[in-house]
Image: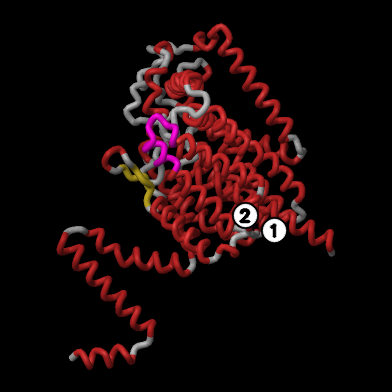
Amino acid sequence: MIKRFNNMMARLDSSQTIFLVYAGIMLLSLFAGIATEWYFLAGVPAALLLGYVVLLDFKKVFYLLMFFVPISMEIHLPNGLGTDLPTEPLIVGLMFVFGLYLLRNPKTYDGNIITHPLTLILLLHVGWTYFTSFTSEQVMVSVKFSLAKTWYVAVFFFMAGHLIKTEKDFKTLFWVILPPLLFSVAIILLRHSTLGFAFDKVNKVMWPFQRNHVSYAATLSIFFPFIFFSRYWFEKGSRQRWYMNAVTVFMIVAIYLTYTRAAYIALLIAAGAFFVIRFRLVRLVLAAAMVAVTGLVIFLVSNNNYLDYAPNYDTTIAHKKFDNLIEATAKMEDISTMERLHRWIAGVRMSVEEPVTGFGPGNFYNFYKSYTVTGFKTYVSDNPEKSGIHSYYLMMLVEQGVLGFVLFLVLSFFALIRGEQIYHESRSPLRKHMVMTVLLCLVIIDAFLIINDLVETDKAGSFFFLCLAILVNFDLSNQREKAAIKNG
């Protein structure tokens, strides 16, 4: 019997053997899952197949990851933990695979990416995040935060920098992301339509693709420049151009129906930024913005003027109609706006106490309540959902000190300043459009970060680091082309 089996196996080629082994694993996994009621065991063959594809060609798995970004689901785990499926396991797995790939093939990675000024600033930012993790008030919380940032930077910046190098790669990335994004938007709009597109029902139709309407609005707004400028890839009057025009209008309607003020403002800022970049005014506008913000802070701090803006606890409420929300915002009687102020004031007071290294990454929630000012308390200040400070810049100041705040600000500003230069140095209209796309994407993210903390989420953080990587690669391509012209 054994001899007959050996003779049969000898007649099979390697591909047939692999197929039989894989079929055996499938059957064993299925039976094991049924017998033990551990049904996840039935997924072992899929995990093995994915692992094989990763080792064979991780570029395809990277695109698979980007396909899942718009439709990933946030899963809550025991002990207050959570993850995004299937994206987070893919991110962690790709980080290790890419690390092993670089260990075996170190010369395949473009060293110019590592020595680029934007990369060096990013590495300083990540390095300071780790340093403040070990000076943290709660080290384990901070280390977990730093590890999450590490795999985002490793995959969406360094791996993306290795894979998304050309205009063709950029287009492939776009076409991978667009279908699942449109699918999720169509599902959400269909559900919302059954509720009459009511403002107070918008959060109820987000599951399973989004946490809330703000996250949804951010996702749509961040990708909107990609959709808008993709229209210019096709000739006027062509069927493809009309299709992308229709998609653009569809996305504008979808963004409006998110009822998210931050999205509207971010898109208006991006529209202005388009002309700022075109006319080389980025430095001037950033300087003016810094002067304005500094002046506002000085005014609010002087003589404790900020206390004059304390809300009325009884009239500061949530609103069920969007028109009422806009009116309440103007009167500073909107619950979400005033709760942000409540936490921002606590954050500023925390930063005064720990100005050098802060309280440690991920630690705002654990310490902020003892720094709040009672006069700014709202009826949602108990914060049972354990949400953060709702401003990434302030979060950097509170959790990583003044230097952490400055490093992130320098990273954000330098990306826009260098990006403006890359835009004007790009010779082809196609590359100009692509550079403008990622710059406006970064502008929208930066605008959202004023009143949200979204960088450590797969739907926003992925695009933040991805856009930085694309800028670096287009900058290097421009430099190579200039050198070729000079030498040729």
The colour scheme used to paint the residues is secondary structure
On screen, residue 388 above or below 71? above
Q: Please, what is the three-letter code of the amino acid marked with disc 2?
A: Trp
Q: Main secondary structure of the magenta part?
A: helix
What label sits on residue 48 in the rendered view? none
Q: Residues within 10 Å of mark 2 (few under 14, many from 20)?
A: some
- Residue 77 lies, in percent from the top left, at 29, 43
Furthest residue in direction left, as rendered: 35
> Hey, what amino acid is under mark 1?
Glu
Would you identify the image quadrant in which residue 361 lies?
top left
Check the picture and name the quadrant holding the C terminus: bottom right
Residue 7 vertical placement versus 140 (above, below): below
Q: Tell me the quarter of the picture where residue 194 sits.
A: top left
Question: What residue is drawn where x is 41% and y is 48%?
Answer: 187
Q: Nearer the viewer, residue 415 or 329?
A: 415
Q: CA distance from mark 2 to mark 1?
A: 10 Å
Mark 2 secondary-structure assignment: helix
Q: Which residue is mark 1?
A: 235
Q: Nearer the viewer, residue 95 or 138?
A: 138
Asked if the stretch drawn in magenta spans residue 145, the answer is yes
Instruction: Select label 2 or label 1 by which is in front.
Output: 1
Q: Position of residue 46 (x, y in %)?
A: 34, 65
Report the magenta residues as a range: 134-146
Is residue 68 among the parts visible in the rendering? yes
The residue that appears at 67% across and 49% down in the rendered structure is 435
For label 2, the residue is 242
Q: Residue at x 42, y 34 (%)?
A: 362
**Along the line of sight, which residue is nearer the eye, 363 or 282?**
363
200 or 47, which is in the foreground?
47
Closer to the N terminus: mark 2 or mark 1? Answer: 1
The percent position of residue 231, horizontal first and vertical second, equals 64, 53
Q: Is residue 451 visible?
A: no
